[in-house]
Image (cartoon, rainbow, N blue to C red):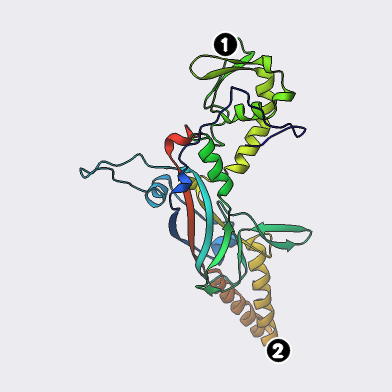
Amino acid sequence: MSMKKNNVPETSIEPNAPAVGSSPFSKPPNHRTIVVNLESTVGKLSKGEPLSFQIGEKAAGTIFKNQQYVSIHGATARPADIRTAVIEEVKMVGCNSTMPIAIGMQITGVEPKEFVAQGDIGTGFSVVIPPEHQSNIDKVLQKNDTHVASQFASEFPGFGPQNIASKGIVEAPNKQSYFVERQHPLMAIVQENADNLQMAHVQPFENNMFMVSSHIVDSLMPPLKVQVARQLPCTNLENLRVDAHPADYPTFAAAFHKISQNEMAKIDASFEGMTGPDVEEKIKQQKAAALRAFSAVPCNIQAKLQFVYHTLEETDVGNVE
């Protein structure tokens, strides 16, 4: 880990000698394909019904966790924690949309890289699906380089963004210092910045621990949290969610109102030059029928999403809040 201040060179200070453990990235990544079905109608969406998919905790465990047998008697290993998954790649491997408008999808673990200008605002989506679109061509939505994450997991086994401030670090009763494990990433920063720190405030303690003054911990912990989150970006797959929004309109109601206006204009044009009470009644009836038919139009999207990811062992990241 590198967080040197003022280009201070590394030193050979005794407190920090991070152990190199086996990385979960040494195993092949997991592959899962999830079929996301979003179903509604023009009428329901116009009234504000959301078009979204959210996986449940049990379903997520069934889909994303690997059950590994460790004996011929059926004993299984403790499953990996999918709340701290490191995504390597997300692809859309198939899509079928009956929507009459372009749809922007926001997907957990996928950065918004496709933008649509809506007035003075640019809205970002994980992917934009054209109107009435069908495709079986693979499209990469997210690609992450996991080399840095693998290196961090190997150098600091058991530590992650969820527990960096709680695992291997305990505030002392005097509230003026902390007990910090030798292998905690914080001690790597202490070593790298030794020349800038008052090392009298870092003292060896029993059980492979060090006593570090509160002002050092309070100063180094915030940037450490940021760097760990960058080096080991984790996604909670138990909270996998897909939300669909109109790409070119602020709301579904606005989008479908625009389409319905065009249809009403066509009906008016079909009676151009005709007058009389009967004509007005026919126009009224045709418009009402057209609106009812349009309101019942299915708005369905089926998207096949393939996730390629690594999971950290449950004991590697401690308790996740």
Which residue type carries mark 1? Pro
Residue at disc 2, secondary structure: loop
Q: Earlier in the sequence, mark 1 or mark 2?
A: 1
Query: At x 61% / y 71%, what residue is drawn?
Result: 130
Q: Is residue 7 left or right of residue 82?
A: right
Q: Which residue is mark 1?
A: 173
The x, y position of residue 311, in whole percent, is: 46, 45
Secondary structure category for the residue under label 1: loop
Task: Tell me what residue is drawn at x 60 percent, y 9 percent.
Answer: 174
In the rendered view, does 260 fall on the left or right side of 78?
right
Quarter of the image for residue 12 reads: top right
| Between 97 and 320, the one nearer to me in the picture | 320
Residue with the most extreme bottom position: 273
Q: Residue furthest left?
A: 73
Question: Looking at numbered disc 2 in the image, what kind of residue is underneath it?
Answer: Met
Nearest to the eye among marks 1 and 2: give it: 1
Q: Which mark is residue 274?
A: 2
